């Protein structure tokens, strides 16, 4: 190790820094590969299956699409918030959203959906205020 540090110092500070960065990057990549190869626990797999059902804005992808298909003026849809609750192998999703009605007045509604953990839709209820 001492010889390596001496050789780094002889090559100059910039070359030594480059070598150090390459070593740290290689170590980081090694750790990332080892982490990716480790098997996941059933609870981690289950949590990933749940998280994959939600989009970047926090909405449930299938529920949001189903609601937008039912709207009279779908372009005015605005997601407010989505909450979910795990009940055994079922996911109960509640989404609050607002839309403009045909008269241009913005109204708030709630849609509720029941989904299996793998994302299969079991039941949807629309338009609760």
Image (cartoon, rainbow, N blue to C red):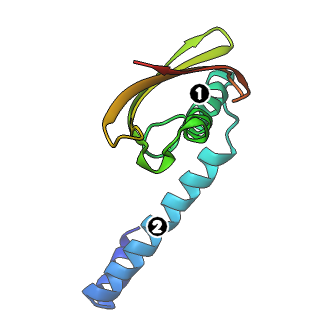
**Is 23 or 37 nearer to us in this picture?**
37
Q: Position of residue 8 (x, y in %)?
A: 35, 82
Above or below 28: residue 123 = above
Above or below 12: residue 97 = above
- Please rate how many residues cluster around mark 1, counting C-alpha atoms within 10 Å: few if below 14, some from 14 to 19, many from 20: few
Quarter of the view holding residue 126: top right
Which residue is outermost to the top?
Answer: 88
Q: Position of residue 73 (x, y in %)?
A: 48, 45
Q: Position of residue 58 (x, y in %)?
A: 44, 37
Residue at (41, 67) in percent of width and height: 1
- The reply to whether residue 56 is in sight is yes
Circle 1 SS class: helix
Q: Quadrant of the C terminus?
A: top left
- Please rate how many residues cluster around mark 2, counting C-alpha atoms within 10 Å: few if below 14, some from 14 to 19, many from 20: few
User: In the visual, does 110 lie left or right of 124?
Assistant: left
Q: Which mark is residue 88?
A: none
Which residue bears the numbered disc 2? 25
Is the Cβ of the residue at disc 1 closer than 8 Å to that at disc 2? Answer: no
Quarter of the view holding residue 18: bottom left
User: In the visual, does 76 lie left or right of 125?
Assistant: left
- The reply to whether residue 94 is in sight is no
Which residue bears the numbered disc 1? 47
**Is 37 or 112 nearer to us in this picture?**
112
Quarter of the view holding residue 68: top right
The answer to which of marks 1 and 2 sits earlier in the sequence is 2
């Amino acid at each position: 190790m001492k010889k390596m540090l001496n050789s780094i110092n002889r090559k100059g500070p910039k070359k030594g820094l480059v070598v150090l960065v390459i070593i740290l990057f290689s170590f980081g990549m090694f750790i990332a590969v080892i982490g990716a190869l480790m098997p996941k626990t059933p609870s981690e797999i289950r949590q990933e299956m749940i998280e994959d059902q939600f989009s970047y804005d926090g909405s449930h992808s299938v529920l949001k699409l189903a609601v937008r298909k039912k709207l009279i003026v779908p372009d005015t849809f605005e997601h407010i918030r989505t909450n979910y609750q795990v009940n055994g192998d079922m996911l109960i999703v509640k989404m609050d959203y607002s839309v403009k009605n045909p008269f241009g007045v913005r109204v708030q509604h709630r849609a509720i959906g029941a989904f299996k953990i793998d994302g299969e839709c079991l039941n949807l209820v629309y338009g609760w205020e």
